Image (cartoon, rainbow, N blue to C red):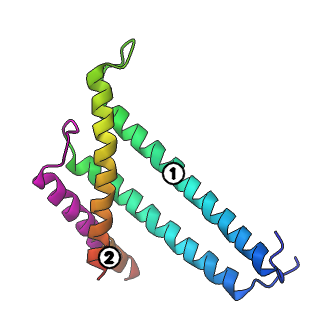
């Protein structure tokens, strides 16, 4: 990637592309973590299909994990003040 | 190795994105650790107040512990 004297518009395109790639990488990692946590919590004895209660547990778990991320994030930024 | 000079705009941009990524990594790590400590039962429709307090406390204590450990390592 040649960074020497780029034009302003190719700069912008490059920065947008990088931002997208970073956002994607973050989403991938988040997905992996939530999947691991919620499978562990909700599917304790895997059977021949996901039961209604297992599915419902997974759904709630995802919501709670997202919420936990917000709580931890806010605690971190309050401590930084 | 040839050195290309990067525009200040790009340098700033990369630095910002690096900082953002570091913050995201920290939040991710903290959430992981504190979820394990604080959310012990089956997930429900909302957190109890003791769960939210635990998560908040955990995050803040983790950061304090980090500072403590860094200080010890600097002696």
Q: In terms of secondary structure, what is the magenta stretch mainly?
A: helix
- The answer to whether dots 2 and 1 both sit on one chain is no
Quadrant where the C terminus of chain B sits is: bottom left
Residue A81 visible somewhere in the drawing: yes
Residue at (28% x, 50% y) in the render: B35
- Residue A69, quarter of the rendered image: bottom left
Q: Which mark is residue B67?
A: 2
Q: Residue at x 18, y 38 (%)?
A: B41
Q: Is residue B23 left or right of residue B65?
A: right
Q: Is B50 positioned to the left or the right of A20 in the image? A: left
The disc numbered 2 marks a residue on which chain? B
The residue to which callout 1 is attached is A27
Query: Range of the magenta residues?
Result: B41-64
Q: Are dots 2 and 1 in contact, CB under 8 Å?
A: no
Task: From the top left corner, tell me how far across and down residue A53 is, in percent.
Answer: 26, 24
User: A37 left or right of B64?
Assistant: right
Q: Residues within 10 Å of mark 1 (few under 14, many from 20)?
A: few
Q: From the top left corner, tell me how far across and down residue B66 is, in percent.
A: 33, 71
- Looking at the rendered structure, the secondary structure element under dot 1 is helix
> In x, y percent, where is residue A81?
29, 83
Residue A7, placed above or below residue A65: below
Quadrant location, the N terminus of chain B: bottom right
The label shown at residue B24 is none
Residue farthest to the right, as pictured? B2
- For marks 2 and 1, give the CA distance: 29 Å
The magenta stretch spans residue B28: no
Mark 2 residue element: helix
Residue count near mark 2 (Cα–Cα under 10 Å), binned few <14, some 14–19, many ≥20? few
Say which residue appears at 53% left-offset and 48% top-offset: A28
Direction top: furthest residue: A48
């Amino acid at each position: 990637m040649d960074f020497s004297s780029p034009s302003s518009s190719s700069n912008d395109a490059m920065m947008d592309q990088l931002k997208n790639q970073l956002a994607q990488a973050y989403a991938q990692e988040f997905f992996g973590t939530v999947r691991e946590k919620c499978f562990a919590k909700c599917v304790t004895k895997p059977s021949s299909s996901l039961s209604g209660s297992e599915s419902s547990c997974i759904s709630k778990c995802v919501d709670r994990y997202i919420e936990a991320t917000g709580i931890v994030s806010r605690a971190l930024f309050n401590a930084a003040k | 190795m040839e050195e290309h000079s990067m525009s200040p705009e790009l340098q700033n941009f990369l630095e910002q994105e690096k900082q953002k990524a570091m913050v995201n990594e920290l939040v991710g790590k903290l959430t992981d650790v504190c979820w394990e400590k604080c959310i012990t039962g089956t997930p429900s429709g909302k957190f109890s107040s003791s769960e939210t307090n635990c998560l908040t406390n955990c995050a803040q204590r983790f950061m304090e512990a980090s500072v403590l450990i860094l200080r010890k390592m600097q002696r």
